[in-house]
């Protein structure tokens, strides 16, 4: 495999370019962009090459000889004579000089790439010399797609880095800046001063904590990287280790930064015994990496708490005293109906929906669920909380069934109140929760209720959970 010449440091170095035709004109462009002192030796200068003469270091109108190779950093043979080109390459190789004969792959130590430039951003396209036509076409496509404003954005980022805002500790803020549409819009308007101020502000924002030795249980969404949450992207790009499901798309995993350890801990349809063993190994690995002081992301397809193993993983982390957080993901419960244009609820047609797994440890899910096996989520629950909780008791649920109220979920004002079907309504009023309030009813809420009991040492009717 050959490599694009633009990856070789040529700044200020003499490069011999033999030939003056259209092919030589194509070869001279990446050399000039690389900052080389291009020495052209040719008997004739074409119109294509003539437009670059003011940027070429030296032009000699004479036949090229083997002696011209001496002292060059690189040799590019692009004459119309195949034998002369090979002679120059042989002479260069004898002196340990990189060389290239145009359209003669065995005599190429490197390839001249198609280049797209946006200020300090340089993109090179190479086909290992196989199809210069394809490389050129791809360059034209990229030229059309990549906005010119990227030049100014890149220069802004370079200036910020030169002022010391660099290094792995700042990578989260750098990634946020790169994804910030405001900066590009301001640059497009020509307001580089405001764009620079916005960039400075992003770099000085307090970064969300993701301490070493912490595990983030992250939902990767239904598949497309476009449906990742911003926090999920942040954790993926700040992780030291990512333990991911088999169903997480490669496009999502590609967002991890170089050096991140990616470990597939996924499971497919397997025997129950083998599945249990796999779960134990996955949890043990998660705990091990956290104890090593790594920032660990346990990356689930969809959402970790919707038919995932997130709850069991949280139990294991709490038992070991390892800090954890949960980053919700867009579940297929929401994504699949949206893809089909099917609303899950609609006034006059559907008052709610249930979510089931196709298969559990006991086999396929069939028939009505026992109330003890079902988790009930009630949205916009504050106004009718007494009637709602009372109705769930009338449906056959025990009054001491755990019931949780979450006010302002994911907002700065988020508050959680834990209780039971019998006690939660009074506790919500005592806590003065404000809309929006979501109710979660079912045995899965016992962890939150138990945490509150452990903190107080007795069994209160209900209390707010920090």
Image (cartoon, grey):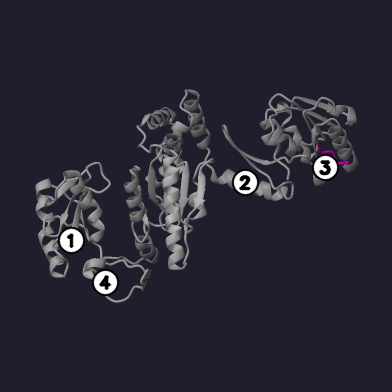
- Residue at image mark 2: 140
Q: Nearer the viewer, mark 1 or mark 3?
A: 1
Q: Are marks 1 and 4 in contact (CB under 8 Å)?
A: no
From this viewpoint, is residue 302 visible?
yes
Q: Which quarter shows the C terminus?
A: top left
Sequence order check: which comes first, mark 2 or mark 4? 2
Left or right: 412 in relation to 286? left
- Residue at image mark 4: 369
Sequence order check: which comes first, mark 3 or mark 4? 3
Sequence order check: which comes first, mark 1 or mark 4? 4
Sequence order check: which comes first, mark 1 or mark 2? 2
- Residue at image mark 1: 401
The image position of residue 108, as x and y in percent, is 79, 41
Q: Secondary structure at mark 1?
A: loop
Q: Nearer the viewer, mark 2 or mark 4?
A: 4
Q: Is residue 176 above or below residue 450?
A: above
- Range of the magenta residues? 77-81
Numbered mark located on residue 107 in the image = 3
Residue at coordinates 21% horizontally, 70% vertically from top-left? 348
Label 1, label 3: how many angstroms apart (C-alpha)?
78 Å
The image position of residue 438, as x and y in percent, is 21, 55
Bin the neighbour count of mark 2 within 10 Å (Cα to Cα): few under 14, some 14-19, many 20 and up: some
């Amino acid at each position: 495999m050959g490599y694009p010449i633009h990856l070789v440091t040529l700044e200020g170095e003499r490069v011999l370019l033999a030939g003056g035709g259209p092919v030589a004109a194509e070869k001279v462009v990446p050399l000039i962009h690389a900052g080389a002192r291009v020495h052209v030796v040719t008997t004739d200068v074409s119109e294509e090459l003539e437009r670059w003469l003011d940027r070429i270091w030296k032009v000699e109108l004479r036949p090229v000889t083997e002696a011209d190779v001496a002292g060059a950093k690189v040799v590019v043979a692009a004459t119309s004579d195949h034998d002369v080109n090979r002679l120059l390459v042989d002479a260069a190789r004898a002196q340990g000089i990189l060389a290239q004969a145009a359209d003669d792959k065995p005599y190429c130590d490197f390839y001249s790439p198609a280049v797209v430039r946006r200020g300090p951003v340089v993109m090179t396209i190479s086909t290992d010399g196989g199809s210069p036509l394809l490389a050129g076409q791809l360059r034209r496509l990229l030229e059309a797609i990549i906005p010119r404003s990227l030049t100014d954005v890149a220069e802004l980022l370079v200036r910020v880095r030169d002022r010391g805002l660099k290094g792995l500790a700042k990578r989260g803020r750098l990634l946020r800046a790169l994804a910030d549409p405001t900066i590009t819009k301001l640059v497009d308007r020509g307001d580089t001063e405001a764009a620079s101020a916005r960039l400075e502000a992003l770099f000085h924002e307090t970064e969300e904590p993701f301490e070493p030795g912490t595990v983030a249980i992250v939902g990767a969404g239904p598949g497309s990287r476009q449906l990742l949450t911003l926090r999920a992207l942040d954790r993926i790009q700040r992780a030291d280790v990512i333990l991911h499901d088999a169903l997480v798309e490669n496009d999502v995993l590609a967002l991890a930064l170089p050096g991140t350890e990616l470990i597939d801990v996924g499971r497919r349809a397997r025997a129950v015994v083998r599945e249990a063993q796999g779960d134990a190994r996955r949890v043990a690995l998660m705990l091990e990496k956290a104890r090593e002081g790594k920032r660990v992301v346990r990356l689930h397809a969809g959402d970790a708490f919707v038919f995932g193993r997130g709850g069991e993983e949280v139990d294991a982390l709490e038992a070991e005293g390892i800090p954890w957080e949960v980053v919700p993901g867009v579940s297929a419960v929401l994504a699949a109906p949206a893809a089909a244009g099917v609303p899950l609820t609609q006034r006059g047609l559907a008052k709610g929906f249930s979510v089931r797994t196709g298969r559990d440890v006991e086999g396929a899910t069939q028939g009505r669920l026992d109330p003890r096996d079902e988790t009930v989520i009630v949205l916009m629950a504050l106004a009718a909380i007494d009637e709602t909780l009372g109705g769930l008791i009338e449906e056959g649920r025990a009054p001491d069934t755990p019931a949780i109220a979450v006010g302002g979920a994911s907002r700065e004002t988020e508050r959680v109140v834990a209780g039971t079907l019998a006690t939660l309504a009074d506790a919500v009023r005592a806590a003065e929760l404000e809309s929006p309030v979501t109710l979660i009813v079912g045995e899965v809420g016992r962890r939150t209720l138990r945490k509150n009991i452990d903190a107080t040492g007795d069994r209160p009717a209900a209390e707010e959970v920090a």
